[in-house]
Amino acid sequence: MDKLIVEGGRPLEGVVRAAGSKNAVLPVLAASLLTREPLRVPNAPLLADVDSMLAVLRDLGCQAERNADASVEVQSAEHLSDRAGWDHVRKMRGSVAVLGPLLARTGRAEVSLPGGCVLGVRPIDVHLKGLRALGAEIRVEHGYVVAEAPGGRLRGAELFLGSAFGPSVLGTANVLMAATLARGRTVIHGAACEPEVVDLCRCLLAMGARISGVGSPRLEVEGVDELGGAEHAVIPDRIEAGTYLLAGAICGGRVVVEGCRPDHLTALFDRLIEAGMPFEVGDGWVASLPYDRGAQRPRSTDVTTHPYPGFPTDLQAQWMALMTLADGFSIVTERIYPDRYMHLAELQRLGANIRRQGATAIVCGCERLSGAPVTASDLRASAALVLAGLVAEGTTEVHRVYHIDRGYERIEERLAGLGAEIRRVRD
């Protein structure tokens, strides 16, 4: 197992390019199950989660390989297995995205309940409700979801996918993919509007799906008998771009993130303005601007996570790392995953003053953090601890960084390219 060793206090300056989106590429790869023809993703990011999804697809009988040019190509088998086993699915929650397309293609799917980050209870009820509305008979037994389409094919329906925590991105993806091969017309109300869902729609349209209302909470799908292959480049990763922008902000340096979609980051920009953090936005790039950290601290802010276009839950931990150094009290409220606060205790080890009350964290900003050994509990918590380590006095050791490899390409190399003193060693 590896750990990252971060020597704090180094200024950051330079250019980093956003990789393809992790949260977009996983359902896009799952969509390869809907066709017998190849699906190629030229910009699939080099992530552990992508490797895990490819392993799931191979387990189902697909040829799934990463090419020398870093692209990924999946060729679905003529006769797929209908069982996605625990060994691979347990590694990440995104694996559940194979449930809908596998059911639609084969008429039966047996998929292990997924694993992933420790973020509290994250049920897949929305996925199952939507698939039941399409006619699937579903039961859960021995840790597996077993879904069957009577007569071998799903049927179109009008359904609502809302939940207590807002629209489900993966739930929308699963039901949407299943509906592309269902008999008749499907109308999905309460669909997630995240850029990753829009990106999946673009891929499915390129494969021959008939979808209208893309980008809205109402998706209409006319089922077709079969889909074809496609080449689809996924959108840039807005969470990775936001993380590097915040790295520049927390260190007071100029970090330019190229190849990103600034229009996907407007909620983050709004909070940076409120916090008094200087930045620039251009055509396909964003940049933090230098400031004197000794004379200027971030202003305290209130942040509440919401579905897109609100502030993303996947940037909550990184934002909290910045607010630990703010001047005054900040309030962070988590509306998507109320238990997503495993990073609080570890930030406290670095000197942060944070108190939690239910789904809200109250952050009393301090003038400095100090390095210490910390343990990552999940993907975004890992990034927050690295950001805090970049600015903390002394040495910070971030343990269990296999989490960070799920969502960031070689983060230590890319931060080192910006001037950070960070290295990976065996723990």
Image (cartoon, helix red, strand yellow):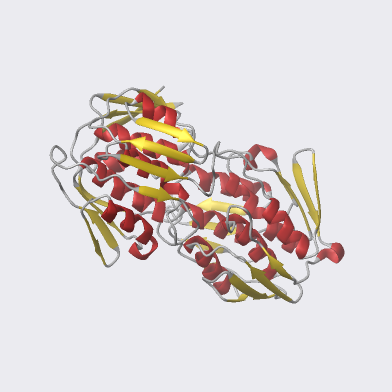
- Residue 292: name its quadrant: top left
> Residue at horizontal 65%, vertical 74%?
221
Residue 44, position as x, y percentages in the image: 46, 55
- Residue 424: name its quadrant: top left
Residue 48, position as x, y percentages in the image: 49, 42
Q: Nearer the viewer, residue 91 or 359?
A: 359
Q: Nearer the viewer, residue 368 or 231?
A: 368
Which residue is at the far right?
151
Q: Is residue 181 above or below residue 94?
A: below
| 211 sits to left or right of 100 | left
Indicate the quadrant containing the C terminus: top left, top right, bottom left or bottom right. Answer: top left
Query: Is residue 404 among what the camera can see?
Result: no
> Residue at horizontal 29%, vertical 25%?
371
Query: Is residue 202 among what the camera can see?
Result: yes
Q: In this view, does 25 lie above or below 371?
A: below
> Residue at horizontal 47%, vertical 52%?
22
Q: In this view, does 376 lie above or below 419?
A: above
Q: Which of 62 and 118 is in front in this view?
A: 118
Residue 88, position as x, y percentages in the image: 63, 40
> Residue at horizontal 24%, vertical 30%?
368
Q: How many numbered badges does the structure rendering display?
A: 0
Q: Which of 300 and 135 is in front in this view?
A: 300
Residue 353, position as x, y percentages in the image: 35, 30
| 231 sits to left or right of 163 | left
